[in-house]
Amino acid sequence: MTTSEKLQIVDHCEECGGELIQGQSVWKVGENLLCTRACMLNYVGAVTITAGEE
Ligand SMILES: [Zn+2]
């Protein structure tokens, strides 16, 4: 690893605790940041179902 390629960790995912790198595209819910759509959906408790079937 060279110093020029050193990644700057700016925050952590609220769901999985994963590192969020400066410049990374992340999800924001309120003031909380999530690393992926899957983490965001888990965090807010959203699940996919089939309409009409429960
Ligand atoms: Zn995450």
Image (cartoon, rainbow, N blue to C red):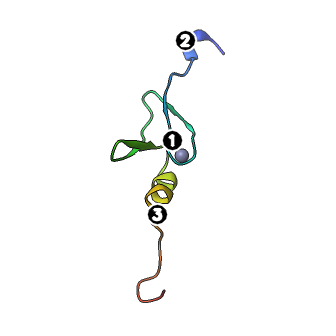
Name the secondary structure under disc 3: loop
Amino acid carrying mark 1 in the image: Cys
Q: At 57% from the left edge and 17% from the top edge, which residue is drawn?
A: 6
Q: At 55% from the left edge and 11% from the top edge, which residue is drawn?
A: 4
Amino acid carrying mark 2 in the image: Ser
Name the secondary structure under disc 1: loop
16 and 26: which is toward the camera: 16
Mark 3–mark 1 CB contact (< 8 Å) = no
Q: Is mark 1 within 8 Å of ligand 1?
A: yes
As drawn, the label of residue 4 is 2
- The residue beneath circle 3 is 45
Q: At 41% from the left edge and 84% from the top edge, which residue is drawn?
A: 51
Q: Earlier in the sequence, mark 3 or mark 2?
A: 2
- The residue beneath circle 1 is 13
Residue 18 spot, x, y in % from top left = 57, 39
As drawn, the label of residue 44 is none
